[in-house]
């Protein structure tokens, strides 16, 4: 199934850039942004393109959701109830719930079933203006089932015409059949699963859950070494529940990002700054777990570490399907400024995926990925709580949604 959308080729005029830039028009030709500037000075090469009146809408780059676990079987509403009754994330995991219960449901599901469950979730994120998304494995925990997840992620990217970056998260949890044999499982991840999935072209980056209830610092480093040997970039679920020193380790391996980081130390921040690693903030998980330990926003800001914001969509700790809502929560819960939140779901999120040269900012020569919003001012993008503003979405040079009726 491939969805056909109309071409976005044309001279889009009467728009306002949300980042304060002065251009009021842009030309899309052959699916690429060919020119940006003042409509009064359009080069003749573009005057013959169809003129599209953006009706004064606010333009942003396509949004980037840089941390999701979108492909999985089942759901975990029962844990929501357990936590409401007082159980912690760790207690739920130790009681046999948590990641491992989604592993069971994911293993039991066929590739088709996983696709059918993930597709409407993806559509909902796309409807929010997402033009590039990361999708992790990590609910298969065997070669066969991790492959199934990653293949679904790739197919979603092709079928929906959206940039998908796949991340292999084989070291997400210890599968039940390896209970008490953590090192054996890490060996399997490093020497069998990762090389095989990489050879099949299914892996763009490698991630680990480094935590007391998941994998140690030493185990994390083994996975990083295996990734490095294959030339794959790494990222890390780091310092979510405790300060394990994972971020500093990840920075030593040139990590694209460290994610969650509620318990990140100053040493970790310094290492991330030196390595150019992005701090990915996940307010959906913070909120769902009713966490109270804030990530060190002020210190990250002072150090100049780029901060991204993502849904962390997953069935356990963040069943969230609106990136705009996450931007709102990053402001309200974490005290990001509006410009920080907007960079967090565009340019900094693209950097967290290594996509900074192609996504997250509007620039000539890039694929046309942008959103026109029926909003008066940029702060409205993060101000409305759960509202989906009127919008026209251009993704990969095609008009994926024309809510403003500009065509
Ligand atoms: O990003 N922290 C680890 N991984 C996920 C949760 C996965 C789950 O609970 O299913 C996260 O929050
Ligand atoms: Fe996550």
Image: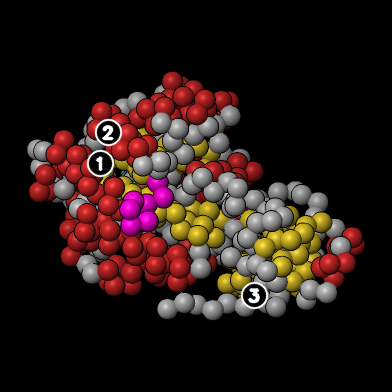
Q: Residues within 10 Å of mark 3 (few under 14, many from 20)?
A: some
Q: Give the residue drawn at x 40%, y 54%.
A: 166
Q: Position of residue 14 (x, y in %)?
A: 80, 65
Which secondary structure lies at badge 3? loop
| Highlighted range, magenta | 198-205
Quadrant showing the C terminus = bottom right
Residue 293 shows up from this direction: no
Q: Earlier in the sequence, mark 1 or mark 2?
A: 1
Instruction: Give me the C-alpha separation between circle 1 and circle 2.
Output: 7 Å
Q: Nearer the viewer, residue 298 or 133?
A: 133
User: Mark 1 or mark 3: which is in front?
Assistant: 1
Q: Earlier in the sequence, mark 1 or mark 3?
A: 3
Q: Earlier in the sequence, mark 3 or mark 2?
A: 3
Residue bearing mark 3: 7
Q: Is mark 1 within 8 Å of ligand 1?
A: no
Which secondary structure lies at badge 1? helix
Q: Is mark 3 within 8 Å of ligand 2?
A: no
Instruction: Using the image, tell me which numbered label, if any, was put on residue 88.
Output: none
């Amino acid at each position: 199934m491939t969805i056909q959308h109309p071409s976005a080729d044309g001279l889009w005029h009467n728009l306002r850039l949300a980042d304060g830039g002065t251009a009021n028009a842009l030309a899309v030709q052959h699916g690429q942004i060919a020119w940006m500037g003042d409509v009064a000075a359009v080069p003749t090469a573009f005057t013959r393109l169809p003129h599209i009146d953006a009706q004064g809408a606010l333009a942003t780059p396509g949004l980037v959701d840089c941390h999701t676990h979108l492909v999985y079987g089942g759901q975990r509403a029962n844990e929501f109830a357990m936590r409401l009754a007082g159980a912690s994330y760790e207690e739920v995991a130790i009681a046999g719930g948590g990641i491992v219960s989604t592993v069971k449901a994911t293993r039991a599901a066929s590739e088709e079933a996983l696709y059918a469950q993930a597709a409407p979730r993806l559509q909902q994120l796309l409807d929010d203006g997402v033009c590039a998304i990361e999708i992790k494995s990590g609910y298969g925990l065997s070669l066969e089932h991790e492959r199934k997840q990653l293949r679904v992620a790739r197919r979603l990217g092709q079928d929906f015409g959206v940039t998908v970056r796949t991340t292999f998260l084989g070291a997400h949890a210890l599968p039940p059949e390896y209970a008490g044999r953590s090192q054996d499982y890490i060996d399997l991840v490093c020497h069998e699963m990762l090389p095989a999935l990489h050879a099949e072209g299914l892996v763009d980056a490698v991630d680990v859950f480094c935590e007391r209830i998941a994998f140690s610092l030493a185990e994390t480093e083994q996975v990083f070494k295996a990734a490095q040997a294959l030339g794959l970039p790494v990222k890390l679920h780091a310092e979510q529940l405790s300060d394990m020193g994972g971020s500093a380790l990840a920075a030593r391996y040139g990590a694209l990002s460290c994610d969650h980081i509620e318990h990140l130390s100053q040493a970790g921040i310094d290492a991330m700054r030196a390595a150019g690693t992005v701090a990915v903030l996940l307010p959906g998980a913070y909120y769902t777990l009713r966490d109270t330990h804030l990530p060190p926003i002020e210190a990250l800001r002072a150090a100049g570490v780029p901060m991204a914001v993502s849904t962390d969509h997953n069935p356990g700790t963040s069943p969230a399907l609106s990136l705009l809502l996450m931007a709102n929560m990053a402001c309200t819960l974490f005290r990001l400024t509006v410009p920080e939140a907007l960079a967090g779901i565009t340019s900094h999120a693209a950097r967290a995926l290594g996509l900074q040269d192609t996504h997250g900012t509007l620039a000539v020569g890039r694929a046309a990925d942008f959103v026109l919003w029926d909003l008066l001012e940029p702060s409205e993008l993060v101000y409305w709580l759960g509202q989906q503003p009127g919008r026209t979405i251009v993704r990969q040079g095609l008009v994926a949604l024309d809510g403003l009726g500009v065509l």
